[in-house]
Amino acid sequence: MRRLLFTAPLATAAALVLAACGTTEPAADDAKESTEAITLTDASGAEVELDGPAEKVVGTEWNVVEHLVSLGVDPVGVADVKGYKTWDAAVPLKNEPKDIGTRGEPSMDTIASLKPDLIVATTDLQPNALKQLRKIAPVLEVKSADAADPIGRMLENVDLIAEATGTTERAATLKKDFETTLAEGRKALADAGLDGAEIAFADGYVASNQVSVRPYTSGSLIGAVNERLGLKNAWKQKGDEAYGLASTDVEGLTGLGKVQFVYIGNDGDESSDPFANELAGNSVWKSLPFVKSGDVHRLDDGIWMFGGTGSMERYADALVASLTK
């Protein structure tokens, strides 16, 4: 299934052309930023040297693509364009970038044909692939995720990409808007008497006729946003060290008690909503307290659970609307 993180630690265990015309389109407040040479240190510790702010940029993972678009940079190449358009409607592509292949195995020939100024990749990409990419163009490697500080990691990645593309003022605006959205969402939930309410966010999928559930613990980006909104994470499982994801099945939901159960599916992925489909007649599922009380919430399609500030703002707005209606 396209939505799964291609190198998430639990994925295996859970069975889990206009492109060349893409340019940086900075916001008005970025117009006076420097065009001098740039030297950065990326997540791998490597020094990345650019002649000036990168304009022709390739993104190998959806979160960095979202960061680029949010910063006003239309990437010339994107991994799995169709998947991005399906799963990240919160920050839609504004151009028609070249599809460079999958997020796990980008096409080196396709990327080379785009003659990019910069390739933005994540630590999820295999070292051999990164080595090949560095022969094509400068590579800015960002840390994919960090369960110790999910929001901090997301914002640091935004800042690093902004430095490389000369859009630091735009990055400051993105971060301010993100904080405002969380503050407003927290107030709305508190006003509705939901401050401290327990929440269990998960996604589910079907493989080989088996339903798997991925709890998003406090170490996940969405888990961290939930806590900033004043909610309490109900999951007791320990997530992985990068994404804060755990693994369970329908029987594993019986320990949750009376919580707000929240998930995101997608009509473009038929395996992405087992809660409304495969489990609809399941006796264990139907016996769960939150199912009986009607506290199961499917949020809007197109919110990428591992995205950037735009996806997390859309998530916060959708969550607040669903919990307070």
Image (tube, rainbow, N blue to C red):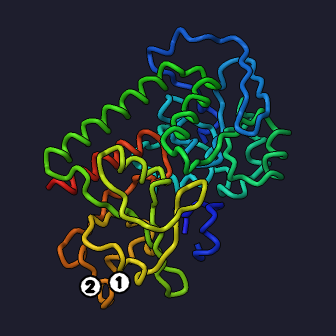
Place of residue 30 in the rendered image (x, y in percent of width and height, measured from the top left): 50, 15
Label pair 2/1, CB-CB below 8 angstroms: no
Q: Please state if 322 lies on the left or on the right of 261 as rendered.
A: left
Alpha-carbon distance for marks 2 and 1? 8 Å
In the rendered view, tell whether residue 229 sits above or below residue 32: below
The residue under label 2 is: 286
The quarter in which the C terminus is drawn is: bottom left
Quadrant position of residue 313: top left
The secondary structure type at the circle numbered 1 is: loop
Q: Residue at x 65, y 34 (%)?
A: 57
Of residue 272 and residue 238, the one placed in the foreground of this image is: 238
Q: Please state if 202 lies on the left or on the right of 317 as rendered.
A: right
Which three-letter amino acid code belongs to the residue tagged 1? Leu
The secondary structure type at the circle numbered 2 is: helix
In the rendered view, tell whether residue 278 sits above or below residue 197: below
As drawn, the label of residue 279 is 1
Q: Earlier in the sequence, mark 2 or mark 1?
A: 1
* Neighbour tally class for label 1: few under 14, some 14-19, many 20 plus, Cα within 10 Å: some
As drawn, the label of residue 15 is none
Place of residue 212 in the rendered image (x, y in percent of width and height, measured from the top left): 48, 77
In the rendered view, tell whether residue 213 sits above or below residue 85: below
Place of residue 103 in the rendered image (x, y in percent of width and height, measured from the top left): 65, 55
Q: Please state if 301 lies on the left or on the right of 320 as rendered.
A: right
* Neighbour tally class for label 2: few under 14, some 14-19, many 20 plus, Cα within 10 Å: few
Closest to the camera, between mark 2 and mark 1, is: 2
Give the mark count: 2
